[in-house]
Structure formats: C-alpha cells, structure tokens
Amino acid sequence: MKNRKEATLIFPHQLFREHPGLSQERKVYLIEEPLFFGDYHYQLNFHKKKLVLHRASLKYYQDLLEEQDYQVVYIDYPPHPDSEYLFSHLEKEKIDTLYWVDVVDWALEKRLKSYCKDKDINYIEMDSPAFLTTREEIHTYFASKKHYFLTSFYIWQRKRMNILMDKGKPAGGKWTYDKENRKKIPQGTKIPTIIQLKENKYVKEAKRYVDKKFPHNPGTTHGFNYPTTHQEAQKWFKDFVDHKLPFFGDYEDAIISDESFLFHSVISSSINNGLITPDEILKHILRAKNIPLNSLEGFIRQIIGWREFLRGVYIEDGVKERTTNFFQNKNKMNEKLYQGRTGLEPYDKVVQKVIKQGFTHHIERLMVLGNLMLLVELDPDEIYKWFMEMFIDSYDWVMVPNVYGMSQYADGGLITTKPYFTSSNYLLRMSDFSRGDWCKVWDGLFWCFVKKHQDLISKNPRLAVLKRNLKNRKKMIEHHKNARNFREKL
C-alpha cells in the first residue's frame, strides 16, 4: 500500500491555539481563502480593517506554527480569486488526504467536498473549537422543531452544560435577566476606554499589504486596534472582565451617539477567528469575582445561547433563510444608505462608526441599521452584502441568520416571534439622540410600514395594538407625506 500524502487546511477563521488538525507528520496550509478576502463568484468588498485582521493574524499564526516545527505552506490571496488556486496547488503536491476543521461556511464546505469527490481525495472533518455544541448535538436539538426559539435553546444549553445552575434550577431564580438589561446610560457616566494595543509587526505589514492589494475597499487601515495574536485576545478579554463586565448587563442595550464600544467586550472578531475560544471565555468569566448576576448571565447568554443558536440555525436552515423574502422587499442599497448620508441622524452616525471601526454593538445593528433598512424595504440580499462587507466580525454563519432572520424577518418568523422595527420613540428612550426632524421621517416610514403590513401585524399579539393608530387619518396623511418626501430624496 502506498504512503498517503496528507495535509491540513487552515482558513482565516480557524487560528486556534490548540488546533485539532495539527500534526508534525503532515504539511499545514494557511490559506488566504478568497471567500474571506474577496471572491470572484461571491463578490464582496470587505472593510480594510477586516482584511488587516485576517492578514496580520494569519502571518502571526504562521510564525507560531513554524516555531513549533510544523511544515507550513502559506497561500497568499491569488491573482484570480477563487478556491481553484488552492486546489491546483494541492494537485501539484499530489495530496490524497485532507484534514480540516468544520468551516461552518456553506460555499467553502461545498467547494472542499466537491473537490475531494471529483479528485477521489479522502478527507477528515473535525469539530471546531470555535463552538461549544457539536453538529450532532445541533441536529438532534433542532430536528423536530418547526420554529426555533433562542430562549428554549439557551435553557437547554444551561442545563446541558451545567452553567449558572443551582440544584437543577437557574441561579438567582431566573433563566434570563434580559428585561433588567435595558437601561439608558445616565448623563455623566464614565465610559471605560477600549484597550489600546501596541501595533505589532504583523499589523504593520498587513496594513501595507491591504492598502496595496485592496485600495478601493471600504474603510481605512488607519487606527486598526483589534487583537491579532492569542496573547492580545486574552489581554483584551481580561480588560473587559475587569473594567466593563460589571456594568455590561445594565447598559447592554444602550446607545451613545459618539461612542462605539461602551461596556461591550468587542471580543467577537477574536472569538470568530479562533484567537480565543468560547471555552476559554467561559473558564475566565466563571472565575470572575463580584460580577452582578444580570451582567454575568447576559454575557453568558451571548456566548452559549445566541452565538451557538445562530450557528445551529445556519447549519440546519441557512439555505432556506437566505432564499426567502417574506416581505418581498426589493429596493437596492444606494450610496446614501451605504455611506450614511441619509439625513437621519441615528442611522448616519452609526454607519459612520462602522466605516471608521468596522464595528458597532448588537443593538445599533438591529434597532438602528436593520430597523431603517427594513422600513425603507431594502432587498435582504443587499443588506446581507452590506453587513458582510462592513463588519470586522462578519462571517456567513453570523450574517445569514442575523440578517435574514433576526433583523429583516425575511424567513417569515423561523427564529423570531415578530419583526423588529420601531418608531423614533425607542431610539430616543435608549440613546442620547435629541428629538429632531429625523423623528418625523422615521415615524413616517414606521407608520407606512405598519399600514402596508397591517394584516400580518393584527395577527401578532405583540404588535396588534399598533393597528389602532392607523385610524387617525390626519396623522397618517402627515406620515405618508414625510415618508414619501424622504424616499424621493433618497
């Protein structure tokens, strides 16, 4: 029997300190996969800071593996950006067995498995340390369900993992403290500054690389400040636990117009590319002292609940979600919406934060960006593309359920009980934005949306009360006028 020629494939979102596919017996391919940098078939122009993150952390990981005497082959972003470049390289090397960790990416998984089938190559696919729930566990949980609910999944996770449990019951007597976590940040509250990382050699090289290869992509490489090594990710998360976590619960839904990070961990870019794992995060956070239960529970819910839930939805029904358009919204993303030049202060401010940093927190994403995009009836595919391009932590498994499900209700309620859209009142209540002309426009769009979809809204107990306001004919005429004028300018 001939000797097998094996290789391990590692992609930009799999930079685990303890990677299950590593072996001194086979080569390791570190790959600037076009699906994460810019692909010929799935054309996305990623934010420059996202590209710096991938390049810098990959080059760091290359050095780390070579220091440990692994045989590393680094595949730069190819001249013709598709996965065939990698496959042709593997063919030249006569590789007959491939190892990779679950990529949790529909297009990449399809390409890898199609290549292996076409070329009669063996492959071994391993569970990903990026998640706490195996594919088998996900499938078992979701298999018999027609609708997926986060709270039920989260309770199952808490029990299964025995986290924040007290004799079989939830610590403190409640499964979730979400209702207590909706406070507005009082004026004068001191917001902890985000930790400033010293620019390492990998970031310096990556900034030059990105500016040269991707000069027309959105954003800028200037001011890059995200972890690109395991040590930086650990330091970053420790800073969050020490200085922000105690206040996270109270203010996790709050918005301040000129602040990007508030009391959030901003660890998503690191957990999503493998520089820190959810297991490491849980071990650290459960050792923390003097953390209010609402903050501890709220953050743990994001890690073992929401994040794992979205990945499960993506695995089980991602294709269905991304190919459904419940409201039949068809409008295109224009330059004003893309760049944050609509004249609606909350939306424009948040977009400009994204352009600058590649990041905003989850409430700004859902209740400002997604909210307006739904009200102006953008095509969900256009919204998905924008979120994928603009965010430092964007990956297909993240954005498909978040955009098509949570934000735009394009899946018709597969993962939510109602569409998420609000008038200006919510934004005024949860932020420091002042009342102004933007409120009239936002409310006009809101009430026009309610009227257009009143049949759906009247059937939903959580929204039915809105229909009563449609009887005020004078107000509705004004709302229609404000919405129409805005749409014409847009």
Image (cartoon, rainbow, N blue to C red):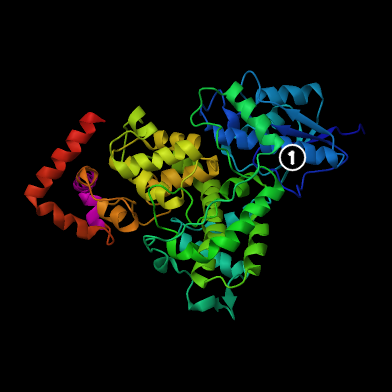
Position of residue 182 measured from the top left corner of the image (x, y, whole percent): 39, 63
Query: What's under tag 1, amino acid-wise?
Result: Tyr
Q: Which residues are magenta?
A: 442-459
Residue 458 belongs to magenta span = yes
* The quadrant where residue 116 appears: top right
- Residue sticking out furthest to the bottom: 167
Front residue (pair 325, 11): 11
Query: SS of the residue at dot 1?
Result: helix
Q: Which residue occupies the foreground of this view, 346 or 369?
A: 346
User: Which image quadrant is residue 66 in?
Assistant: top right
Residue drawn where x is 82% and y is 25% of the image = 94
Q: Quadrant of the C terminus?
A: top left
Residue drawn where x is 54% and y is 24% of the image? 41
Q: Residue at the left extreme? A: 474
Query: What residue sits right under mark 1 in the picture?
Result: 61
Q: Which image quarter is the N terminus in?
A: top right
- Residues 415 and 279: in front is 279
**Number of marks:** 1
Whether residue 405 is situated above or below residue 56 in the rendered picture: below
Where residue 221 appears, as percent x and y from the top left, is 56, 32
Magenta span: predominant SS is helix
* Horizontal relation, residue 70 to residue 167: left or right: right
